[in-house]
């Protein structure tokens, strides 16, 4: 966390995130080919000005360092970058102009009084806003165009002769490089699974003619296979790269499998969240809005890293003009909007909300421009109506998209009200859409929402119905109907992606079905562990075995085996079993409403803004301690105030 009045690197707000986001979305590689993301990608501004007014009580001096070319104007006199500037006492107006045709224009001002701390404004010569900064760049010897990763050496936990070569198992998912000691050139075949690494022809990553001096690209893997090699002739070491972050959360219980699921979920999210929340470390390495939406809910109950979420939101949105939906996916753009509100509820960061609100508002207008006379949002040419990897009737307008749009309107009304913006028109849009959603998509006979009314098929899937519960679109009677006719109905197509398992289990818990969700955690996520998973996957079908487990998108190894949306057990356990949630922005008030019938013993520490909450259960005794004020324990129909560092103990 950057402290007030400390100098930091400054840039136009959002530009660091947008520039680094572009670089992140160019990092995908497949079988020797680079694969930049296939959607429109913004970059940072190329010339920026910074300004600030001082009333100096006495003479002072300062130096401006910059990434780029430019100059400093002090009360109308120009000065070069990198040279000490003397200022007399009195009114002083400083403006710094920086341009950079290839990288992020940024400044660092070193001085006792005049320095690059809060209070500086940045302009792209159209809009002026408080300058942006990041906790990673607080020293003048740093370059905000260069991300410096920490490294950890990882040695193989096992190696064995197989298929005429040697298979090296590093025992964990590595995101980094390999160092080689060999007397002759070798071939490296990488794999998240053993099966992939041993498939010399089709493994995702392969590098030939590697010697001890060959530059080896950063990749993600657990296994490396060296064909045409004998044991003891080649020494391989992995160098894992990462950005360190604190993890205040802990979870142990009397169920060892649940404990392992928590640990593997934590490792999965950790790997998929360095500078940004990315989907997975092997295949895409892209920033997807749907993946990021879930990642921050999970992050809220583990690392509670506000910076990663903020960077991701800014990178996804890009510059002001909107040319297409995020990742080309209509529902992902809507999840981005909803994610802004979750960030505010998590952090209470009003300054960020003020900066991002104009982009939030223009995004919502982009949706409105894409609605028909009934208020329904529809897919246009080159739009992707995704929702999930599932069989769904997507003819015409789709119910799941309309439910998301309702929550978008709720989001803009809430955020706008915080900032005292006019929001009445969004209420009118909400009312029209809700009425028509119920008229055209709710099917009384099926007791559920159908996917599409235009096709006439009256096809029901889980997705729109799940969203309707999560976003409070229907009353209690219809929620019960959806529970019976959809969520607990095995005739409705099952969900196989952890992505929508997140939403489904969230909805079930909201309806009080924690006992069912607990079993899903054991069966579904535990099922991946039974298959040898060290991180959680992009998709899991318990009926698949062998090589078919790793196939996706028509590729035998297209499935990501370390995917951020697979880490949702952390959120489910923290939110719905421990029962922790904020009840006002930034956890100024929060509640703990435990549902721990599945556990005889449990000890967990979960983060809140500026503190932690410790919950312990031992048989029928529950103890809760919060390190900050604002908390309420709700148990046995009682509401008990939590005072800072005072343990409350109750009998269950």
Image (cartoon, rainbow, N blue to C red):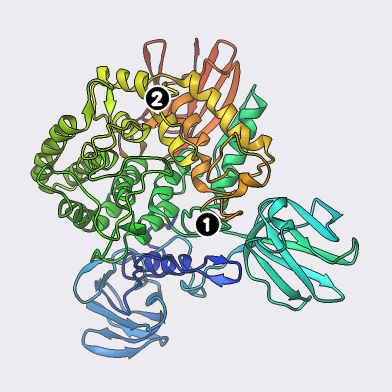
**Dot 2, how many residues are within 10 Å of its Cα: few (below 14), some (14-19), or many (20+)?**
many
Report x, y in % for residue 365.
Answer: 17, 54
Lower position in the chain sequence, tag 1 or tag 2: 1
Residue at position x 36%, y 33% from top? 461
Q: Position of residue 132 (x, y in %)?
A: 34, 65
Q: Position of residue 474 (x, y in %)?
A: 24, 26
Residue at mark 1 to residue at mark 2: CA–CA distance: 35 Å
* Viewer-closest of 408 and 153: 408
Locate the N terminus and report the quarter of the image it occupies.
bottom left
Relative to 372, residue 24 above or below: below
Q: As displayed, is residue 27 above or below residue 62?
A: above
Whether residue 299 appears in this view of the structure is yes
Q: Give me the disc on residue 274.
A: 1
Q: Is residue 159 left or right of residue 612?
A: right
Point out the residue furthest to the front here. Answer: 456
Q: Residues within 10 Å of mark 1 (few under 14, many from 20)?
A: some
Question: Secondary structure beneath disc 2?
Answer: helix
Per the image, the residue denoted by label 2 is 487
């Amino acid at each position: 966390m950057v402290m007030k009045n400390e100098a930091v690197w400054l840039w136009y707000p959002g530009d660091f995130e947008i520039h680094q986001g572009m670089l992140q979305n160019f990092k995908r590689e497949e079988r020797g080919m680079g694969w930049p993301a296939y959607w429109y990608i913004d970059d940072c501004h190329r010339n920026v000005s910074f300004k600030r007014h001082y009333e100096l009580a006495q003479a002072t001096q300062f130096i401006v360092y910059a990434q780029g070319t430019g100059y400093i104007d002090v009360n109308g006199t120009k000065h070069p970058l990198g040279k000490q500037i003397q200022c007399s006492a009195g009114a002083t107006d400083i403006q710094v102009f920086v341009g950079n045709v290839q990288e992020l224009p940024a400044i660092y001002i070193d001085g006792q009084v005049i320095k690059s701390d809060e209070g500086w404004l940045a302009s792209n010569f159209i809009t002026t806003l408080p300058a942006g900064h990041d906790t990673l760049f607080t020293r003048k010897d740093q370059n905000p165009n260069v991300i410096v990763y920490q490294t950890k050496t990882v040695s193989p936990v096992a190696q064995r002769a197989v298929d005429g070569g040697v298979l090296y198992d590093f025992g964990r998912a590595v995101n980094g490089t390999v160092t080689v000691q060999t007397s002759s050139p070798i071939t490296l075949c990488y794999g998240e699974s053993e099966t992939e690494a041993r498939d010399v022809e089709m493994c995702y990553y392969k590098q030939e003619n590697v010697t001890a001096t060959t530059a080896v690209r950063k990749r993600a893997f657990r296994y490396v296979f060296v064909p045409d090699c004998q044991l003891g002739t080649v020494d391989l070491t992995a160098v894992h790269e990462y950005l360190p972050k604190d993890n205040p959360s802990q979870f142990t219980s009397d169920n060892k499998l649940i404990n392992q699921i928590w640990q593997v979920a934590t490792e999965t999210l950790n790997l998929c969240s360095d500078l940004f929340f990315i989907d997975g470390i092997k295949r895409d390495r892209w920033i997807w809005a749907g993946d990021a939406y879930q990642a921050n809910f999970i992050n809220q109950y583990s690392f509670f890293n506000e910076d990663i979420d903020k960077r991701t939101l800014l990178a996804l949105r890009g510059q002001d003009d909107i040319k297409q939906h995020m990742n080309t996916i209509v529902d992902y753009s809507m999840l981005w909007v909803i994610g802004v509100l979750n960030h505010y509820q998590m952090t209470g960061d009003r300054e960020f909300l003020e900066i991002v609100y104009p982009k939030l508002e223009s995004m919502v207008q982009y949706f409105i421009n894409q609605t028909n006379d009934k208020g329904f949002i529809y897919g246009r040419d080159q739009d992707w109506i995704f929702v999930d990897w599932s069989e769904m009737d997507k003819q015409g307008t789709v119910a799941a998209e309309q439910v998301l749009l309702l929550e978008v309107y709720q989001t803009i009304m809430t955020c706008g009200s915080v900032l005292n913006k006019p929001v009445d028109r969004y209420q009118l849009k909400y009312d029209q859409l809700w009425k028509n959603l119920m008229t055209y998509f709710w099917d009384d006979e099926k007791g559920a929402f159908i996917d599409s009314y235009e096709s006439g098929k009256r096809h029901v899937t889980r997705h729109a119905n799940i969203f309707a519960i999560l976003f409070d679109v229907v009353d209690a009677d219809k929620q019960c109907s959806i529970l019976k006719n959809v969520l607990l109905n095995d005739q409705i197509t099952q969900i196989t992606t952890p992505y929508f398992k997140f939403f489904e289990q969230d909805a079930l818990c909201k309806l009080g079905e924690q006992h069912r969700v607990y079993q899903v955690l054991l069966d579904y996520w535990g099922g991946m562990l039974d298959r040898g998973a060290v991180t959680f996957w992009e998709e899991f079908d318990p009926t698949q075995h062998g090589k078919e487990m790793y196939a996706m998108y028509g590729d035998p190894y297209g499935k990501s085996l370390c995917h951020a949306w697979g880490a949702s057990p952390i959120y489910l356990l923290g939110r719905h079993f421990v029962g922790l949630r904020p009840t006002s922005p930034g956890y100024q008030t929060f509640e703990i409403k435990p549902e721990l019938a599945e556990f005889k013993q449990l000890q967990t520490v979960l983060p809140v803004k500026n503190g932690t909450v410790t919950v312990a259960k031992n048989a029928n005794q529950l103890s809760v301690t919060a390190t900050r004020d604002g908390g309420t324990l709700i148990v046995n129909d009682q509401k008990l105030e939590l005072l800072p560092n005072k343990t409350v103990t109750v009998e269950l």
